[in-house]
Amino acid sequence: MRRSPLMRRIFPLMRRIFPLMRRIFLLMMKRTLLMRRKRALMRKKNLLIGKRIMIPTRLISTGPHQRLKVPSLGAIPRGVQKIDGSV
């Protein structure tokens, strides 16, 4: 495979820059993922802490390690929304 002189000039540069870029990209991704996880946790906690303290709740599992506290049906005062949005 013959390289044009232009390619020959650019190639080492690319070689040097690429790993850097990849490292930076990986760092950024890790940070966003962490942030997202943290935010999800906060949201969950706020949901449970916020309006639903007075309402008796029951746990329904929506997956291997996700349990949602949902107000038990008997005790929902009018106008309070369940987590899934139904009234």
Image (spheres, rainbow, N blue to C red):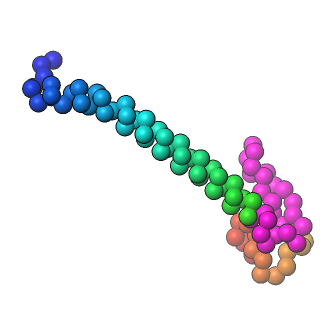
Image side of residue 14 versus residue 4, left or right? right
28, 80: nearer the viewer = 28
Q: Can residue 73 be seen in this view?
A: no
- In the picture as drawn, the residue positioned furthest to the top comes out as 1
- Which residue is depicted at the point 15% across and 28% down? 9
Residue 55 colored magenta? yes
Above or below residue 26? Residue 39 is below
21, 82: nearer the viewer = 21
> Residue 72: which quarter of the image?
bottom right
Q: Which residues fall within the magenta stretch?
A: 47-71
Image side of residue 71 versus residue 83, left or right? right
Query: Which quadrant does the C terminus fall into?
Result: bottom right
> Residue 55: which quarter of the image?
bottom right
- Which residue is depicted at the point 71% across and 66% down? 84
Image side of residue 29 versus residue 34, left or right? left
Residue 45 colored magenta? no
- In the picture as drawn, the residue positioned furthest to the bottom comes out as 78
* Residue 21, horizontal then vertical, whole percent: 37, 37
Above or below residue 65? Residue 71 is below
> Residue 78: which quarter of the image?
bottom right
- Which residue is depicted at the point 78% across and 52% down? 67
